[in-house]
């Protein structure tokens, strides 16, 4: 099987699994326990927090471990709303956000608790910082714009958006789960106050995420029952998960200077081969270059519907997707590609191929060959 769905999840690296294993077996203690076994787990948790903080340019006390990126997004949005409830009730976000953000905003709005402004994106899927500036009101409690899109790979001008928010005195939250490990990440450089990442997008396990919260950025917990994570996210921490996340991120950051140009070249090879060999095929999102995630190729093939493309590619031994894994089974075209304003024929024929550290030139060439056969057959 050729795996080209790394935007959905990545395989856990052997080094990461090896690092976390002792904390599932002999070092199994609860980090809140005061005895020696518990304190051994506490030391591992604290060391992991230190490592994650150092890797993103943060302080250890600004790192909150969560159970996923989705939970971290919810904590950032709902927690900030609760902190400012009664004073501010306006959220600014964008049409291409992950459902962890959009559905959370819809939930707040549905309760009559908040107003939500959903900004459009340009034809490349990027948010204009000036649109953010115009959308901010005195009652805005948060701006939430993702760093890089999980479906079309478009990289947003996060630094500029963050600067706009800082000038307006509004906290800025970004979902950076696709950015982390793929592009250089420093929270000060990005001008962010709240940032989310997760292990399983950078070759770690599922079930562990991080919310970075800049010192002074206050939010309320959204679950209750314990004082863990400085009272911000109660519940016994996953020590093994935290160790794994730190290790996965550390490896990704160390290897990025070599890995990024290699994967970018493979992506460009894939896209250019498809566009040259398959008539009436189109690249969705931003053009090839630095404003696109290195591993992302989102393409449309009018006359061949997305679900049939995915199914037939799977039968050829190639795993890919039509969009976010969180919307699997959806019949309607992805909200992300719809936001680009594409013709209907391109919306219903969009296919995402996302490359990874183990992808080879041979894999890319086999995928292109298979796509050419499948698209030709489906169009007939």
Image (tube, grey):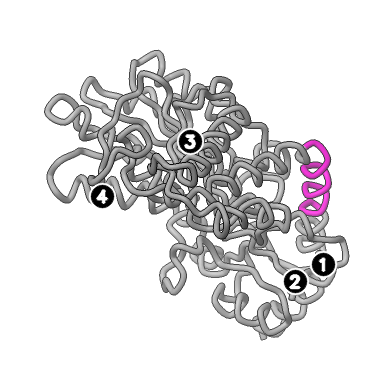
Residue at (67% x, 42% y) in the render:
182
Q: Secondary structure at mark 1?
A: helix
Viewer-proximal residue, 158 or 28?
28
Q: CA distance from mark 1 to mark 2?
A: 6 Å
Q: For numbered disc 3, what is the local secondary structure?
A: loop
How many residues crowd mark 2 within 10 Å: few (<14), some (14–19), many (20+)?
Answer: many
Mark before the other along the chain sequence, 3 or 4: 4
Residue on which disc 3 sits: 127
Label 3 vs 1, first from the N-terminus: 3
Residues marked 1 and 2 touching at CB (< 8 Å) = yes
List the residue tagged with mark 4: 106
Residue 122 in view (yes/no): no
In the depicted structure, whether residue 354 falls above or below residue 2: above
SS class, disc 2: strand
Other-residue count near label 3 (Cα within 10 Å), few / some / many at <14 / 14–19 / ≥20: many
Does the stretch in magenta take in 259? yes
Instruction: Give the x, y percent position of residue 189.
Output: 58, 21
Side of 359 relative to 96 (left or right): right
Magenta segment: 257-268
Q: CA distance from mark 3 to mark 1?
A: 33 Å
Residue drawn where x is 77% and y is 42% of the image: 260
Q: Earlier in the sequence, mark 1 or mark 2?
A: 2
Mark 4 touches mark 2? (CB < 8 Å)? no
Residue under label 2: 2
- Select label 4 or label 2 by which is in front: 2
Q: Main secondary structure of the magenta part?
A: helix
Q: Which residue is mark 1?
A: 363
């Amino acid at each position: 099987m050729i795996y080209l769905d790394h935007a959905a999840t990545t395989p856990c690296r052997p080094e990461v699994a090896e690092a976390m294993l002792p904390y599932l077996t002999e070092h199994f203690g609860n980090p809140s326990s005061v005895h020696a076994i518990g304190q051994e787990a506490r030391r591992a948790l604290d060391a992991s927090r230190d490592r994650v903080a150092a890797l993103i340019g943060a302080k250890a006390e600004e790192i909150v471990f969560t159970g996923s990126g989705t939970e971290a997004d919810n904590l950032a949005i709902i927690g900030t709303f609760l902190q400012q409830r009664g004073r501010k009730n306006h959220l600014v976000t964008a049409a291409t956000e992950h459902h962890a953000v959009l559905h959370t905003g819809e939930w707040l709005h549905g309760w009559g608790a908040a107003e939500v402004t959903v900004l459009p994106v340009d034809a490349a899927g990027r948010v204009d910082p000036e649109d953010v500036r115009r959308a901010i009101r005195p009652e805005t409690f948060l701006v939430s714009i993702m760093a890089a899109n999980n479906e079309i790979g478009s990289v947003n001008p996060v630094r500029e958006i963050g600067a706009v928010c800082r000038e307006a005195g509004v906290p800025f939250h970004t979902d950076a789960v696709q950015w982390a490990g793929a592009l250089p990440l420093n929270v000060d450089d990005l001008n962010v106050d709240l940032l989310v990442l997760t292990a399983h997008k950078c070759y770690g396990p599922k079930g562990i995420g991080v919310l970075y919260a800049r010192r002074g950025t206050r939010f309320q917990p959204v679950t209750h029952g314990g004082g863990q994570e400085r009272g911000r996210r109660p519940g016994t921490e996953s020590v093994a998960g935290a160790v794994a996340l730190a290790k996965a991120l550390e490896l990704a950051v160390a290897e990025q200077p070599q890995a990024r140009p290699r994967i970018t070249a493979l992506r460009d090879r894939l896209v250019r081969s498809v566009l040259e060999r398959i008539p009436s095929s189109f690249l969705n999102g931003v053009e090839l270059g630095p404003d696109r995630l290195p591993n992302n190729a989102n393409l449309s093939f009018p006359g061949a519907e997305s679900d049939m493309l995915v199914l037939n590619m799977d039968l050829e031994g190639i795993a890919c997707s039509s969009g976010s894994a969180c919307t699997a089974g959806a019949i309607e075209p992805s909200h992300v590609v719809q936001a680009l304003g594409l013709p209907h024929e391109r919306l219903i024929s969009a296919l995402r191929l996302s490359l990874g550290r183990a992808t080879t030139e041979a894999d890319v060439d086999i995928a292109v060959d298979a796509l050419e056969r499948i698209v030709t057959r489906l169009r007939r």
